[in-house]
Image (cartoon, rainbow, N blue to C red):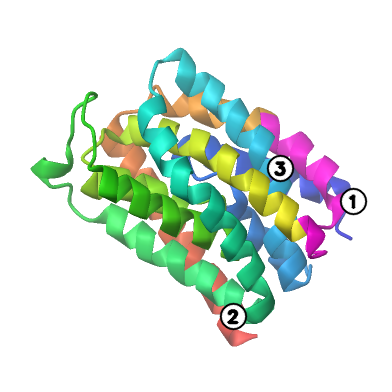
Amino acid sequence: MPDPLVLGALGGIAGLSSGLFGIGGALIATPLLRLTGIEPLLALATPLPAVIPTALSASIAYWRHRLIRWDIASWLLLTGLPGTVLGALATRLVGGTVLMVLTGALLLFVALRMLGPERPSTAGSPDAMPRRTLLLGTGVLAGFLGGLLAIGGGIIIVPALVLWGRMPFKQALATSLLCVAGLALPGTITHAMLGHIAAPLLLPFLAGSLPAAYLGAAVATRLSSVLLRRLYGGTLTAFAVYFLWTQLSG
């Protein structure tokens, strides 16, 4: 088991990423834990319970700025919740190493997509309402991949809302975090039943992630959307390339 101080620091990194980028933090936490030597399935699912309070902590900062779209979140959760359970159950059919590579590949794809030039059509307005078919489809995909890869689903929701739902970036981050907290619950229960969660790792990880998540969200509300989007894409691209290299080379 890694040193508690190391786990706290990793939780801080994941929490800060969660608040800044609306992704829940598990997608960042899984590679970090894997790099400390924790076996793949435990590294995959152990951060998931921490996603719930971490995402809610960050959501408070966004809620104070009235950035959460509750109506959109409800449509995403409608199909996302059952999708999460199906995805978590599917982990029994896929090897741990494959899941790690899928996590890194997904991270890289989305990061590069967000680094691309922002089209005028994606600028959006605060009152924009994406098509319900898009929201329901995004919910299914975010839920299934969130359960399969134990990532909370924010990595799917944010780009979908920004690139295809034409929502403002900060509003998409805020709405995503609320959904992430909801999607993490059935995923946590299912992975716990499958024995994929190492409880002793959680407390120090959570101690670092909670305050960092609120801080990240508070910082995000003060940054320009253009800068925030570039930080999002650039940070995740660099991390994804490094993580994929470690998994494929070793």
What secondary structure is the stretch in magenta mostly built from?
helix
- Distance between mark 1 and mark 2 Cα atoms: 25 Å
Q: Residue at x 65, y 49 (%)?
A: 186
Q: Quadrant of residue 173?
A: top left
| Residue underneath mark 2 | 98
- The residue lying at 59 percent from left, 74 percent from top is 99
Q: Position of residue 64 (x, y in %)?
A: 47, 13
Q: Quadrant of the C terminus?
A: bottom right
Task: Identify residue type, mark 3.
Answer: Ala
Q: Which residues are magenta?
A: 192-210
Q: Is residue 203 magenta?
A: yes
Q: Amino acid at mark 1?
A: Pro
Q: Which residue does the image show at 41% across and 42% down from the upper left?
A: 76
Give the mark nearer the N terminus: 1 vs 2: 2
Classify residue 230 as left or right of residue 207. left
Give the image location of residue 115, x and y in percent: 28, 54
Looking at the rendered structure, which numbered label has been put on residue 129?
A: none
The secondary element bearing badge 2 is classed as: helix
Q: Element under label 1?
A: helix
**In the rendered image, which residue does mark 1 sit on?**
200
Amino acid type of the residue tagged 2 in the rendering:
Val
Identify the residue at image location x=61%, y=52%: 26
Residue of label 3: 50
Distance of mark 1 from mark 3, alpha carbons? 12 Å
